[in-house]
Image (cartoon, rainbow, N blue to C red):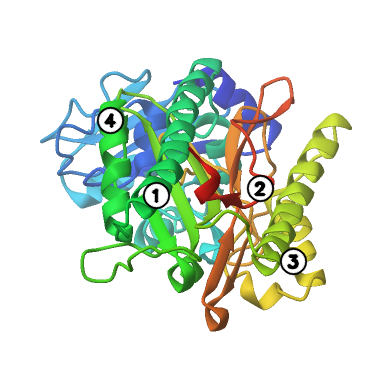
Amino acid sequence: MELSSIQKALRKADIDGWLFYDFHNRDAIAARVLNMDTSRFASRRWFYFIPAKGDPKKLVHRIEPWRCDHLPGEKYIYLAWEEQHALLKQILGKASKVAMQYSPNNAIPYISLVDAGTVELIRSFGITIVSSADLVGQFEAHLSMEDWKSHQQASAVMQMVKDETFREIGKRIRNGQNPLEVEIQAFMHDLMRENEMFWEDGPIVAINEHAADPHFEPTNENSFRMKEGDLVLLDLWAKKNRPGSIYYDITWMGYIGTTVPEREEEIFQIARAARQAGLDLVRERFAADIAVYGWQVDDATRQVIVDAGYGEYFTHRTGHNIGEEVHGNGVNIDNLETKDDRKILPGTCFSIEPGIYLAHEKLGFRTEIDVFVTDEGQVEVTGPMQEKVIPIMTIV
């Protein structure tokens, strides 16, 4: 835990303290920031208060008095709920504005982890609760250079998996095998396991109208057989199978043939131009030392697709934060599903992934890159960016 840095950030934001609360290990943000041991079941509520000035304080139950022993600060122990309330009010002291894992109107659901009843309790003490979203971005979503290295290592593997998958599709088509989408997914799983990767679901292997479903999941029951003339979308994400590793997440498009039809290439180029517009804005703002927010990057990306006449077919946010989870808790590139008004911070990673989904034409397109901003404000794209749809049957 970076106590002095957290307290400095609290003072800069004019917040009196950051109150952590958890029950049953529900708050993964608290676990990461405070390095909590989640391998042990948390059967009782605990609180940890970091004031902007002074020593932290912890409140734990008599049944689990050891819960926060690894953290600095005075320990308070409660048994009855009345005692809990009284001690919590005492711990918060003269604080009038406190940050918690809370988001007004649930605007940023990744941050909305504290239940309404606990919010009501703290407010009953005369305390204003503000969102910890910016603090989370700084202290939970921040990646070290070692983290970035693990992200780059994952990139090298997943780019290889993507390349080998397109090659395998072409090979099987030439051999007259016409593989199912789920069979190609299994091929990818094998490669990922061989290269010591970890993932929880996916990857997406989708052709034609299945590619028009942003979250299509191939199964034995729903998979189509691939054939020449099919448009192929691969969305793959994983991280190295070791503690603390950072995910890598990309989407690439291919066409089973030797020449990509003009229509397919034209729409892909709109998505590519949109992706570039979002990336350009981030680069321009950091180069000029001007703040840039998640919603602004979404707007810049989305406008390209709107101007091309396909705005109604871009049906999800432009991107998401990336960390130890593929969908992390930092800034999302979003002004559709939410208005993410958090500032993109140095040391964070996120995707830019515009899509155009034309179910009525049995076509779907997405292009996805991972962007990392170094602590010095350099904007880096991890791995190559797709510039054209890949003609799969030309790969040998």
Disc 4 marks a residue whose amino acid type is Tyr
Identify the element where label 1 is drawn.
helix
Which dot, 1 or 4, sits closer to the camera? Answer: 1
The picture places residue 26, in percent across and down from the top left corner, at 29, 47
Residue carrying label 2: 342
Q: Earlier in the sequence, mark 2 or mark 4?
A: 4
Seen in the picture, residue 113 relative to 345 is either above or below; the reply is below
Determine which quarter of the picture holds residue 47: top left
Residue nearer the viewer, 34 or 396: 396
Residue carrying label 3: 305
Disc 3 marks a residue whose amino acid type is Ile
- Name the outermost residue toward the bottom: 360
Q: Earlier in the sequence, mark 2 or mark 3?
A: 3
The picture places residue 150, in percent across and down from the top left corner, at 45, 22
The picture places residue 390, in percent across and down from the top left corner, at 58, 49
Distance from Cα at disc 4 to Cα at disc 3: 56 Å
Which dot, 2 or 3, sits closer to the camera? Answer: 3
Q: Which mark is residue 169?
A: 1
Distance from Cα at disc 2 to Cα at disc 3: 23 Å
